[in-house]
Image (cartoon, rainbow, N blue to C red):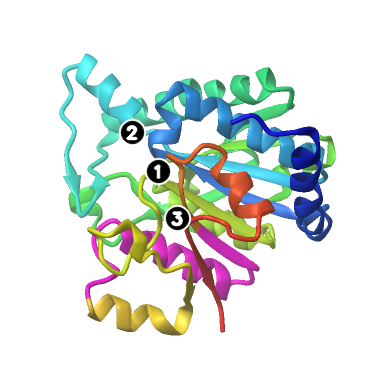
Amino acid sequence: MTLSALEKAEILVEALPYIKDFHGKRVVIKYGGAAMIECELKEKIMQDIVLMKYVGMHPIVVHGGGPEINAMLKRLNMKSEFVDGLRVTDRDTMEIVEMVLGGKVNKEIVSGINASGGKAIGISGKDGQLIIAGPTEDRERLGYVGQVNQVNPGVIETIIENGYIPVIAPIGMDDQRNSYNINADLAAAAIAVAMKADKLVLLTDVPGLLMDPNDPESLISVLRTSEVGKYIEAGVISGGMTPKVQCCVEAVTGGVGRTHIVDGRVPHSILLEVFTRQGVGTMVVNE
């Protein structure tokens, strides 16, 4: 369907209040899932991010890269092992994780943003001591899987002040210079709180939180923090959705304005969530 010039103008007018509200605001985007794999989706995500920058917003990208890590480990005949959804990361695996996330994946995203007309700089949580990390409680089983102990956002501020889009690999470091593999959702939430972001957007491979996982029409559009407990007890929030919702709760209770769990398989899903009345996915809000 081809839109007329008038219809295009009406779309821009509909977006105007949202552009005005978010001008100069920080939006943290956790980039992962199918949107990182499928070429067409990748291009549209890059376009969304660049558009946000040019209308006056400050997007901050935090990315995952699990499939790329799996592929490299397989090429090196190293096994992939997971416990409760977290990659078991010994020292050798940590070297591969850092190489893939901080090198290959990070720079591919940077080049994609640059190719779409933006200006991006790629860093990891080790740069400027951005993410001070430590081991999880289950270090014996998980190894160098990390938790965020502190975020020092100065390096992000410097990148933004100079007109660039920061692209962050979720790798942290402790005071002994050990590197840690940090879940990208957790890293994005912690960075959003430290940056006093107005939005946190988690791109996923599901429509959002569904009342019935087999019915995409049962989407819960708005989830209040007070409702999370009852939905966990009822089994509505379960599996891989549990840590995502918990990250959203931590973010909004930590001062982030709103958080969104968005289906990254939908073309231009970020723009739909930020610039339209309907939005897509599930918005998690504080009381």
User: What residue is pinned by disc 3?
Assistant: 186
The disc, 3 or 1, on the residue closer to the chain's N-terminal end is: 1
Quadrant assignment for the N terminus: top right
**Cα–Cα gap, marks 2 and 1:** 7 Å
User: What residue is pinned by disc 2?
Assistant: 94
19 lies above or below 252 = above
Residues at marks 3 and 1 touching, judged by CB atoms closer than 8 Å? no
- In percent of width and height, residue 102 lies at 49, 28
**Cα–Cα gap, marks 3 and 1:** 13 Å
**Cα–Cα gap, marks 2 and 3:** 18 Å
Residue at 31% across / 83% down in the picture? Answer: 230
User: What residue is pinned by disc 1?
Assistant: 180
In reply to whether residue 259 is colored magenta, the answer given is yes
144 lies above or below 189 = above
Q: Amino acid at mark 3?
A: Leu
The answer to whether residue 157 shows anywhere in this view is no
Q: Amino acid at mark 2?
A: Met
Q: Circle 3: is it few (<14), some (14-19), or many (20+) Cα within 10 Å? A: many
Residue at 47% across / 20% down in the picture? Answer: 104
In reply to whether residue 21 is colored magenta, the answer given is no
Among the 4 quarters of the image, the one containing residue 168:
top right
- Image depth: mark 2 or mark 3 in front: 3
